[in-house]
Image (cartoon, rainbow, N blue to C red):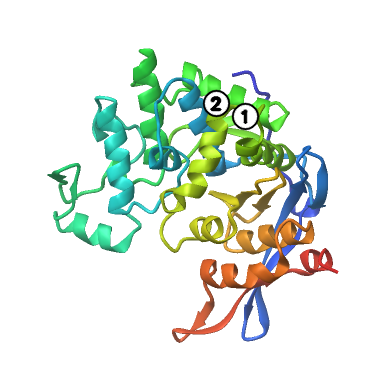
Amino acid sequence: MSATPRSGTFTTDDAVDLAVVDRNGFVESRHLGSAVVVDPAGEVVLELGDTTTPIFPRSSLKPFQALASMQAGAPLVGEQVALACASHVGSAEHMEVADGMLRAAGLTADDLRCPAAWPQHGGTRTALTRGELAIGGRTLPAEKSRLAFNCSGKHAAFLWACVENGWDLATYLDAEHPLQRRVVEILEEYAGESVAHVAVDGCGAPAPAISLRGLARATGRLAAAPSDKSANARAATIATAMLDYPWAVHGHGEENTVVMEDLEIIAKLGAEGVLILGAPDGTACAVKMLDGNGRGATLVGLTLLAAASVVPAGALGPVLSRAMRPVLGGGEPVGGVRLAAPVVALLD
């Protein structure tokens, strides 16, 4: 890949206050960042901060990585499609789907190149640590598992695509692997811009960098695919599956899942404070918190979509009350994350 290396993303001078943390009426922390909303044509509707300097979208790219796997022949269906797009919490449900994908491809968890992890899901973690977790009809050893890693669905899809094409399995994460080159081609096609830099993501896969505007454009095209007769059929399948199986994309009660369940808007987080939101009409939002903390991203992103008249403002309260966690003091709520002034001003 011939992307020209860059030294970094936008700076604090080019960011704005997006959210603050309130503790008993006192602003304890501030989250600076940038955000953009594009219309179905990919034109900017609203923006805050620098939205043209590249960022690493991290796991918010998973729907496009899944698209590459499917276009390469991975025969994903239903919840498998959603899990290929997931940053899941490693519940037994998630692990079962990932394991089933691997078995269908004639592989096992040993073929995964993502790190091993303990499940984030409490009950599943307890069962695994006790050696009592059965997946695929067999009891797993009481140790970290690659199936529990949040990217295991994406990696299982990568591997299945490699099996279908006879591509090398050991090098499927190399930037020059045919599958990873296809990921970049798809991302550039959907974003309408060239990848600016390629690094290595936390799971070991290549991590391309594009702008927030490009990320929002790509998200909008994906989200609108089910209603666009000219769209790629597999892109439409991905957008549909994410909304049909929202639990698989994140986890029961988790932020992305709640947003998709309640609003029928595609929601996908990325590490280091990234979030994409895509409405069925193709309006989309991309958010990057500069400090890497994403606890205010859903609040900011949904508010921007409300300011753009895509989401009814009155619908946000119930969703946010489910999706966001309060600031606690002595175990009781004493505050929360709230919008910073530049975001509030967009609602006037």
Query: Residue 187 got which mark?
Result: 1
Q: Is 348 on the left or on the right of 100, as rendered? A: right
| Residue 51, quarter of picture | top right
Using the image, determine if residue 332 lies above or below residue 175: below
Question: Can you name the residue that lies furthest to the right here?
Answer: 348
Q: Which residue is mark 2?
A: 183
User: x, y (%) of residue 166?
Assistant: 35, 12
- Depicted 271 relative to depicted 153: above or below: below
The image quarter in which residue 105 lies: top left
Q: Is residue 303 above or below residue 97?
A: below
Q: Residue at x 34, y 19 (%)?
A: 163
Point out which mark residue 109 bears: none
Q: Residue at x 33, y 59 (%)?
A: 121
- Look at the image and tell me in which quarter the C terminus lies: bottom right
Residue drawn 40% across the image and 31% down it = 76
Q: Are marks 1 and 2 in contact (CB under 8 Å)?
A: yes
Q: Is residue 13 left or right of residue 330?
A: right
Q: Position of residue 170 (x, y in %)?
A: 34, 21
How far apart are the alpha carbons under marks 1 and 2? 6 Å
User: Which three-letter amino acid code belongs to the residue tagged 2?
Assistant: Val
Amino acid at dot 1:
Leu
Give the crowd class for mark 1: few <14, some 14-19, many >=20 residues within 10 Å.
many
Q: Secondary structure at mark 1?
A: helix
Q: Position of residue 4 (x, y in %)?
A: 68, 24
